[in-house]
Image (cartoon, helix red, strand yellow):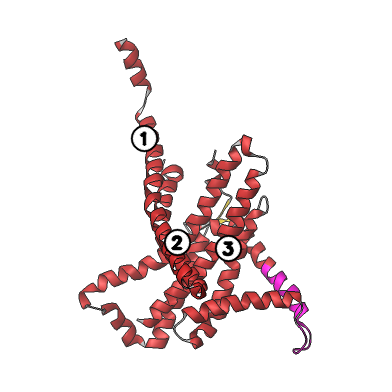
Amino acid sequence: MSEHLGEKLILHIPVGSGGFDIDIITMIMSWIVIGLLVALALLFRRSLRQPVDAKPNRIQATLDLLLQFIESQLTSNFASEKLARELFPFIGTLFLFILFSNWISIIPYFESPTKDLNVTFSFALLVFFMSQFYAVRLNGVRRYIKGFMEPYAFLLPLNVIGLVGKPLSHAFRLFGNMFGGAIMLSIIYSFTFLSFGFPLIVNLFYGLFEGAIQAFVFAILAVAYINAAVET
Amino acid sequence: MLQEAQQVVSGISGADIATAAKYIAAGLCMGIGAIGSAIGEGIAAAHALDGMARQPEMAGRLMTTMVLGQAITESTGIYSLLIAIVLLFVMK
C-alpha cells in the first residue's frame, strides 16, 4: 500500500572505492522550487519599477504586507533590532524556500523536497552553524566557552547534549510532519470509496495549511535558537 | 485435533512472528506516543485562548508563542512517528 514511499530514484556517483548516493527526485524538486522563487522575484520586481512616492499597486502592497509580517516577527523575537535587521534576509529566504517546498506538493506528481530528511537536516545544520557563528562573534570566544559552564562547570556534558539535540529535533520536526502528511495522503488515496473529492480537501489541508504552519514554525524556531545561542 | 494444531503451528515461521511483532510495535508506538503530545498541545491552546479572551490586544504575540510551544511539544509525537516509520519501512 505505502511501499512506494520507501523506493526512490537514487543516482550513485562512484568516487574512489566508495562514492555517494543522490536522490534525483529531491534534487529536481529543489531546483524547481528555486526556479519558481527566482521567477516570482523577477516578475514582482518588474511591478516595483515606478516612482517611490507613487501609490503602490496591488502586488507591491501584498509583498509589503508579507515582508512586514516577517519583519515584525523578527524584531519582536530577537534581542536587538540590529541582529533582526542583519538576519532578516537569511530567515526570510529560509521561510520562503520551505513554504514553497511544502506548497509544491499540492501539484500532482510533484513531491516536496522537505519530505527528504537530508534537505531538512541541511537546513537545521545551516541554522546551527549560523547560531554558533553569531554567538562567537557577538560574545567573544571566552564568553562563548564560558557559556557551556553555566550554571555549574559539571553541567558541561548536559549543555553539549542540549547543543547537539537542537538541530536534530529541528530537522526531524519538519521531516516528520511532511513525511507523516505524505503517508496519510497515500493511505487515503488507497481507499477507493473516498477517491472522489475527499483526497483533494485532505491534500489542500496537508499541502497549504500544514505546510504554511510548519514553514512558520521552522523559521520561528531558527530565530529562537539563534537568539538563545547569542544571549548566553 | 492435536496434529492439526501442530500443523498450524509449524506453518508459522519465526520471520512471520517478527513481521507481526513489527506491525504491532509500530501501531502501539504511534498510538501511545501520540497521547502525550496531543494532551500537551491541547493544554497550550487552552491557556492561550484564556489569555486571548482576557487580553485581546495580546492575541498576535500569544499566537506566536502558542505555535512555538506546540511545535516543541509536538516533537515527542514526531519521535514516535519516526520510530514507527523505521519499524515499518526500514527494519527487515
Measuring from the top left, give residue A201's x and y in whole percent. Answer: 63, 49
Name, please, the residue furthest toward the top: B1
Residue type, numbered disc 3 = Ala
* Mark 3 vs mark 1, CA separation in Å: 39 Å
Disc 2 target residue: B45
Residue type, numbered disc 1 = Ala
Q: Residue at x 58, y 73 (%)?
A: A93
Task: Read off the chain for label 3.
Answer: A
Measuring from the top left, give residue B76's x and y in whole percent. Answer: 38, 56
Task: Read off the chain for label 2.
Answer: B
- Labels 2, 3: one chain: no
Q: Is residue B62 left or right of residue A95?
A: left
Q: Is residue A54 left or right of residue A157?
A: right
Residue A47 belongs to magenta span: yes
Q: Residue at x 52, y 78 (%)?
A: A74
Q: Nearer the viewer, residue B54 or A156?
A: B54
Residue B18's label in the rendered image is 1
Measuring from the top left, give residue A219's x and y in whole percent. Answer: 51, 70
Q: Residue at x 36, y 65 (%)?
A: A165
Residue type, numbered disc 2 = Ala
Height in image: A25 above or below A199?
A: below
Q: Residues within 10 Å of mark 2 (few under 14, many from 20)?
A: some
Segment tinted magenta in the rendering: A37-55
